[in-house]
Amino acid sequence: MQLKPIRLVVTLALIILTAPLASDAQPPGKSRRVGILTAVTAPTIEPLHALLRQELRERGYVEGQHIVLESRSAEGQYERLPALAAQLVALPVDILVTWGTPAVVAAKQVTSTVPIIFLGVGDPVGSGIVASLARPGGNVTGVTNLTAELSSKQLELLKEVVPGLRQIAVLLNPRNPVSALNLRWTELAAQALGVQLQVVKVHDPSEFEAAFLSMTRERADALTVLADSWFLSQRRQIADLAVKHRLPGIFNLREYAEAGGLIAYGPRLADHWRRAAAYVDKILKGTKPADLPIEQPMQFELVVNLKTAQDLGLTLSPTFLFRADEVIR
């Protein structure tokens, strides 16, 4: 990863999003409608909606007075996303906030004029969503999570805590268009570490048990789960099955570790939703999405579930635990 360009993009984004303007004193007078499109279940998305509402409120937007939020979720059925995006556009909405690559791809298929703010997209340039990070172009901007480029660090952490690591099971959702790219990055990381991968595909909750039986049958030593918003909705089942089948796992979001996953390393999802409010504010005040650079995470956190380590019979070194941002006991 080239650090200088990334820092430049982040700096440009922060300047544009936070620079004080005379017109920023108050939100627009009329009520505006913001659509939210995701593929996750209600229990997963509701706390994130609350964060967005809070940040908008702090910027002067009172829900029901200055702004109305309209939410649609595909509940894990990615094929429903284009129709749900069309519903929101037809209301109409002034802005679309999307979470995950499938959601923003669906939104782009439906409209080229309504501003789209994406969150949780691993590689917006490689996925063809925007032209570049500094100059996204078109009607789309947002926050990338750099998930693909984190693969190397995640596998290094996994190898550090699993003695004799030889084979890692990779859980992916084939319906997510970014899974192929994330898998490629994971393959490169595995090659560098000298470990083998076993790719296991799941796109329905009923398939998880068979998937983990396959991992055990193929003698996987550990597990990594590729970034996917629907997988996050299923994090409790994934974490429970990983412990049941004695598979130490590493994940991209702290929510997995809170649900019983062994290790999480990646950006804070809550920060993305807070930053979404800054984009909403700027766009409602007249800034074009094409003029708002893509933000990249500046902080990553390591969260370790010590109870899960004990359940798996793993002893984590004091040095490793000291490096963690949070240890769940």
Image (cartoon, rainbow, N blue to C red):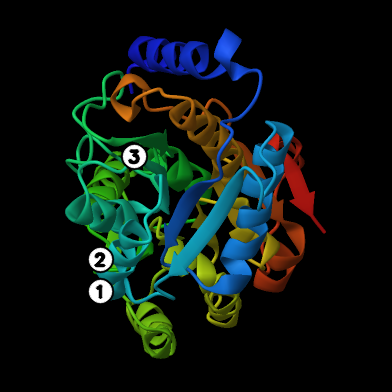
Q: Position of residue 248 (x, y in %)?
A: 55, 64
Q: Position of residue 301 (x, y in %)?
A: 62, 38
What residue did someone put label 1 on? 79
What residue did someone put label 3 on? 115
Local secondary structure at mark 2: helix
Disc 3 from disc 2: Cα separation? 16 Å
> What is the three-letter code of the residue carrying label 1?
Glu
In the picture, measured across the screen, residue 33 lies left or right of residue 236, that is left
Is there any visible trace of residue 223 in the rendered image? no
Q: Position of residue 151 (x, y in %)?
A: 38, 44
Instruction: Answer with the quarter of the image where residue 211 lies.
Output: bottom left
Quarter of the picture containing the N terminus is top left
Local secondary structure at mark 3: loop
Local secondary structure at mark 1: helix
Q: Which mark is residue 237?
A: none
In the picture, measured across the screen, residue 194 lies left or right of residue 128, that is right
Q: Which mark is residue 82?
A: 2
Relative to 278, residue 186 above or below = below
